[in-house]
């Protein structure tokens, strides 16, 4: 916009909010065209919960683990790692791609402790700003180096997946995943969609503990999916935000990835320590891409770093230190594995408690899916209107798609929650 010096100075002199005439064009403040953004469907729920003054309020919105008193948890292995780190680390910048020690330990969790791909240095991997940052970095990389590609996303999925690939300007397609009537996997339609997608398509897969449905393919089904991907030469990008939360064992939860690796796929993978180490706010995760050989991996990593550099330059140091201290020490790693199991088991216990409470209250609706589904979430089947009633009448906060974060359910609130769910669902 061309402004004369005098006019420009005049505008600045009147400050923000000034209205002045420029020829026949009127201009108000810089951001008068900015409308408030839509509330985030997940984090917006937390905002509403925090603003509610009711002593009865319950937050089963965001997937954040709570202990049985409803309090946030810092794992004992994390506390111990912090004690060891305290006072003896400098705070220099990490390399653009993050901590090498952290990456080494993190890759073992996804690809296996004895992975030949790690030994052969075929994995391009960078420390990322948790799972979200890993997905976003991949989406930007996909856009830059496969500019004509699209991403196939399951229906439903974590709402932010749509934002991530949208902002990276990668066109989105969807594939069938969940079957609302059976509240299970729509495997036949999923396979049809895989077959019907153009050869060489990109697919986003949840490695385990699918969010929001709590429904994962069985091992046999994963094998079939992997086989069909091979036939079609599709690319599998795994988002693994809940490793350990499906079965209680991170090794078992890497099963889908291992099946794809055994079948010779060159996968991509986003890992997050938000949930399984409770490092939510540390923003610590990893993006990895399995390449044909070491040379390709070096090139891919350098390009990932080049995407990161103008965005945030290099990732934060503390979470990487905590994770590598834990995973690099057999004793601490064992403690972590035990603590993951405790978290997963408490959630499983709450599934049983919620289902039994609903049945005891005399609900005639089927609730088996509460205990059949796995991971952090229960995809309850409640309608947006029923969820709205839970919030307005009972101060219970959850996403409008009917997802209950089982990680927020406790012995103390499960009865209240069940009663409220019964009240809003009994009239159909
Ligand atoms: N991928 C999936 C499938 C997720 O559910 C989440 C988090 C992430 C990635 C990203 O987590 P991170 O960036 O913190 O590692 N989903 C939460 C929180 C737990 C959120 O929406 O940000 C959820 O409530 O769905």
Image: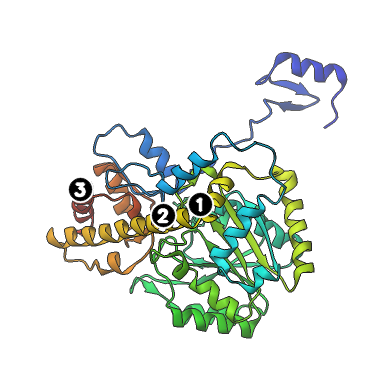
Task: Determine the CA span between mark 2 and mark 1.
Answer: 9 Å
Image quadrant containing the C terminus: bottom left
Give the mark nearer the N terminus: 3 vs 2: 2
Mark with earlier residue (3, 1): 1
Foreground mark, 3 or 1, reads 1
Instruction: Identify the mark at residue 152; answer none if there is no mark.
Output: none
Image quadrant assignment for residue 263: bottom right
The residue sitting at 21% across, 66% down in the picture is 365
Which type of secondary structure does the marked residue at label 3 adopt?
helix
Q: Residue at x 30, y 56 (%)?
A: 346
Q: Is residue 221 above or below residue 111?
A: below
- Picture quadrant where residue 298 is located: bottom right
Q: Nearer the viewer, residue 106 or 203?
A: 106
State left or right for residue 280 relative to residue 307.
Answer: left
- The residue at which mark 1 appears reads as 326
Residue contact between numbered discs 3 and 1, judged by CB atoms under 8 Å = no
* Residue found at x 49% / y 45%: 81
Q: Residues within 10 Å of mark 2 (few under 14, many from 20)?
A: some
Are dots 2 and 1 in contact, CB under 8 Å?
yes
Q: Pick whichever, 402 or 258, lies toward us.
A: 258
Q: Which residue is mark 3?
A: 416
Q: Secondary structure at mark 2?
A: helix
- Residue named by callout 2: 335
């Amino acid at each position: 916009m061309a402004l004369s010096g005098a006019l420009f100075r005049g505008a600045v002199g009147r400050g923000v909010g000034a209205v002045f005439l420029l020829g026949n064009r009127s201009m108000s403040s810089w951001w008068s065209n900015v409308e408030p953004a839509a509330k985030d469907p997940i984090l917006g729920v937390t905002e509403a919960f925090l603003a509610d003054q009711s002593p009865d309020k319950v937050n089963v919105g965001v997937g954040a683990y709570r202990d049985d008193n409803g309090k946030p948890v810092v794992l004992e292995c994390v506390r111990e790692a912090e004690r060891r780190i305290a006072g003896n680390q400098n705070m220099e910048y990490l390399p653009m791609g993050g901590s090498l020690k952290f990456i080494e330990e993190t890759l073992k969790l996804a690809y296996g402790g004895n992975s030949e791909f790690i030994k052969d240095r075929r994995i391009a991997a960078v420390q990322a700003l948790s799972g979200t940052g890993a997905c976003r970095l991949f989406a930007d990389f996909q856009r830059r180096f496969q500019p004509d590609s699209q991403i196939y996303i399951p229906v439903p999925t974590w709402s932010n997946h749509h934002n991530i690939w949208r902002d990276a300007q990668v066109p989105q397609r969807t594939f069938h995943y969940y079957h609302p009537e059976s509240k299970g996997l729509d495997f036949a339609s999923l396979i049809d969609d895989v077959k019907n997608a153009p050869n060489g398509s990109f697919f986003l897969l949840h490695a385990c503990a699918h969010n929001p449905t709590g429904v994962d393919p069985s091992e046999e089904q994963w094998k079939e999916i992997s086989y069909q991907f091979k036939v079609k030469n599709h690319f599998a990008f795994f988002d693994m935000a809940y490793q350990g939360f499906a079965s209680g064992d991170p090794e078992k939860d890497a099963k889908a990835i291992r099946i794809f690796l055994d079948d010779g796929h060159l996968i991509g993978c986003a890992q997050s320590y938000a949930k399984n180490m409770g490092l939510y706010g540390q923003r610590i995760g990893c993006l990895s891409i399995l390449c044909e050989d070491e040379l390709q991996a070096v090139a891919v990593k350098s390009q990932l770093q080049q995407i990161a550099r103008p965005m945030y330059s290099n990732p934060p140091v503390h979470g990487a230190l905590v994770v590598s201290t834990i995973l690099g020490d057999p004793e601490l790693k064992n403690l972590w594995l035990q603590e993951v199991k405790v978290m997963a088991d408490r959630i499983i216990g709450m599934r049983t408690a919620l289902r039994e409470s609903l049945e005891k209250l005399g609900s005639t609706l089927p609730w088996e899916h509460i205990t059949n589904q796995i991971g952090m979430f229960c995809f309850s089947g409640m309608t947006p209107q029923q969820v709205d009633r839970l919030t307005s009448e009972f101060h219970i906060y959850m996403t409008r798609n009917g997802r209950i974060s089982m990680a927020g359910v406790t012995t103390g609130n499960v009865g209240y929650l069940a009663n409220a769910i019964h009240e809003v669902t009994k009239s159909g």
